Each structure stands twice: as structure tokens, then as C-alpha cells.
Image: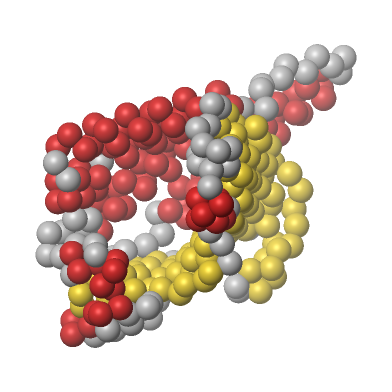
């Protein structure tokens, strides 16, 4: 929602509201930075997305295909130790009621993703070091810094103390609420697009897989899509424990697309829950021996033959 200047007759009350808002921003910023600076721990992210498509003039088969994408569930739970460059993740993806489990492992500059239907792994770097640990960390640090820079005092309000259920049991936490308006959301999305398209990660992926013209086309597509998006609702609830760590974050948003063509999204509702635990504790991360189970990304490009790779 837009910033509001509330005119009230009691100066003390106005002062208290301003102080509360300032404190909320400071607490949230400090907790976000403190948590992201830890090199070890466990983290999870759960995303639920519901999409309404423009089905005008589509065939029944085209509508049937779109129905697979109307509801998406994505979950990832990871153990990490950035000091050793190790990550092990369990992944679950559900599209249109069809679920799939997978795994992701990173060991230094080597990253692997399991292809469940094959019970095999692909080397997502294939010796080219597309994404090394340092670049990956730098990219997401820049994203987080941009988010924190975007927030202003009126956007963040410290609330009451509560008790929440976590992977480590019940924990006392302070609730911080974040509400920002559409203009700021668009500004943030534009900045993320700029960071993404100029990052070493994207540059390497494009260099390996596409010609130089593809990057500019991708930038134009993202920019055009951003102009169509209208944010209708956005809210974040952050839970900060008494040690000052951001242990849980619940994000909800709804957006619609202006002038959606047939087959394109008309509206999207997204909910995201992030959790952190075992923060700063030693992690027992086991990377399986998968060298003999590797297949090349090239082998997956012809999906008609995917089952022949078993």
C-alpha cells in the first residue's frame, strides 16, 4: 500500500508510531544480514503458485496443456556449508497434480541435479564452471542488499512477540510486518532484472548455450513482461528469534497482467515460506558417488529419447 501520513492530535502517539516503524526496519535489516552471513545451517523454501490463464480462442488440447501449469508447488530443503563449498538439497516439484522428487548437490565448483525418471544425474556445469560457489553467493548477496535498500521506515513495522513451531521445536520470536506499494515492487523487479542480466552467472550460461543476440532478446522479454505486471497485493511476515536470526519469512503476493494475449497469464497468486534452522552449526553433508551415473545435458534435449537413456 502507499505511504500514508496519519494526522493525529496526540503528538506522543505520533512519535511512538514513528519510533516503532524505525525499530522494525532496523531489526529486520540486522536479522537478514546476520542470518545470511552465517556459513553453515539448514534452510527450506516452499512456493505455491496459482495461475489464471487467458483461454480465449484456445483449443481444448491447448487448455488441457495449460492446466498442468495452473497450480505449481515447489519445495527445497538444503543443508549447506559455504566454508567447504558444499550443499545438499532435497527438491519436490508438483505441476498440475503430478509430483516429482529430485536432489541437488554442490561440491566446490561441481554441481549435480538428479533426473528422477532416469535415476541418473546431470552435471549442470559440465566442466565449464558455469556457476562457482563464490559467484552464486555474490549474486544472491546483491539481490538481498537491493531488497534491504528498497525498504523504508514506513514499510516495516515491529509487532508482538509470539511462539512458533520450527524444526528445532517451539521458538520465541518477534513478528515484523512488511507492506510495500506497487511502485516500489516494480522498482525492485526492474533492479533484479538488471542484476540478473548483468551477472556472471547469466553471462556464462548464455555464452555456453546461446549466441550473443539471445541475451538481449531475453532482456527485452523480461522488460516487456514487467511493464504488463500490476501488483495488487504484497505482504511479508518475518519472524526473528531472540538471538537476532531471521528464522521464518512468509511472503504473499497477487499480480495481474495487463493486455494478456491468449495462452498468457491473466493473474497469479504466490505464497512463499522460507525457514532457517541449525544456523551456524556443523553440518554432516554427504555427497554421493555419482560419476558413473552421469549423463550429459545434450542427451536430454531430445525428450523423445529420454527413456532410452535408462
Q: Nearer the viewer, residue 221 or 234?
A: 221
Quarter of the view holding residue 115 = bottom left
Is residue 4 depicted above or below 55 in this figure?
above
Quarter of the view holding residue 190 = top left
Q: Position of residue 188 (x, y in %)?
A: 46, 31
Give me the residue at 38% from left, 68% from top.
Answer: 80
Give me the residue at 59% from left, 34% from top.
Answer: 256
Q: Position of residue 216 (x, y in %)?
A: 24, 31
Decide if residue 288 is on the left or right side of residue 282.
left
Q: Where is the C terminus found, in terms of image quarters?
A: bottom left
Q: Position of residue 98 (x, y in %)?
A: 53, 69
Q: Nearer the viewer, residue 63 or 217?
A: 63
Q: Nearer the viewer, residue 77 or 54?
A: 54
Image color mode: secondary structure
Give me the residue at 66% from left, 74% from top.
Answer: 169
Whether residue 152 can be seen here: no
Q: Position of residue 109 (x, y in %)?
A: 19, 64
Whether residue 59 can be seen here: yes
**Exactly how many numbered labels are in the figure?**
0
Decide if residue 309 is on the left or right side of residue 49.
left
- Residue reaching furthest right? 9
Amino acid at each position: 500500500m502507499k505511504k500514508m501520513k496519519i494526522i493525529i492530535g496526540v503528538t506522543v502517539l505520533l512519535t511512538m508510531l514513528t519510533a516503532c516503524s524505525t525499530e522494525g526496519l532496523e531489526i529486520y535489516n540486522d536479522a537478514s544480514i546476520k542470518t545470511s552471513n552465517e556459513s553453515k545451517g539448514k534452510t527450506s523454501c516452499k512456493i505455491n503458485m496459482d495461475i489464471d490463464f487467458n483461454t480465449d480462442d484456445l483449443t481444448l488440447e491447448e487448455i488441457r496443456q495449460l492446466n498442468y501449469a495452473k497450480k505449481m508447488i515447489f519445495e527445497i530443503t538444503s543443508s549447506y556449508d559455504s566454508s567447504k563449498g558444499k550443499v545438499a538439497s532435497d527438491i519436490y516439484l508438483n505441476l498440475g497434480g503430478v509430483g516429482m522428487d529430485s536432489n541437488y548437490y554442490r561440491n566446490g565448483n561441481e554441481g549435480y541435479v538428479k533426473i528422477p525418471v532416469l535415476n541418473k544425474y546431470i552435471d549442470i556445469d559440465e566442466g565449464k564452471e558455469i556457476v562457482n560457489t563464490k559467484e552464486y553467493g555474490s549474486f544472491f548477496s546483491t539481490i538481498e542488499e537491493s531488497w534491504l535498500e528498497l525498504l523504508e521506515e514506513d514499510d516495516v513495522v515491529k509487532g508482538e512477540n509470539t511462539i512458533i513451531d520450527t524444526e528445532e521445536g517451539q521458538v520465541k520470536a518477534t513478528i515484523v510486518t512488511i507492506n510495500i506499494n506497487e511502485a516500489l515492487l516494480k522498482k525492485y523487479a526492474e533492479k533484479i532484472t538488471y542484476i540478473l542480466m548483468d551477472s556472471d552467472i547469466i553471462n556464462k550460461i548464455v555464452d555456453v548455450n546461446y549466441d550473443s543476440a539471445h541475451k538481449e532478446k531475453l532482456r527485452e522479454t523480461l522488460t516487456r513482461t514487467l511493464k504488463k505486471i500490476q501488483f495488487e497485493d504484497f505482504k511479508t511476515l518475518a519472524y526473528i528469534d531472540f538471538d537476532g536470526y531471521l528464522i521464518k519469512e512468509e511472503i504473499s503476493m497477487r499480480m495481474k497482467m495487463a493486455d494478456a494475449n491468449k495462452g498468457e497469464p491473466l493473474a497469479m497468486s504466490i505464497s512463499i515460506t522460507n525457514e532457517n534452522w541449525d544456523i551456524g552449526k556443523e553440518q554432516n553433508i554427504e555427497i554421493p558417488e555419482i560419476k558413473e551415473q552421469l549423463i550429459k545435458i545434450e542427451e536430454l534435449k531430445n525428450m523423445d529419447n529420454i527413456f532410452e537413456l535408462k
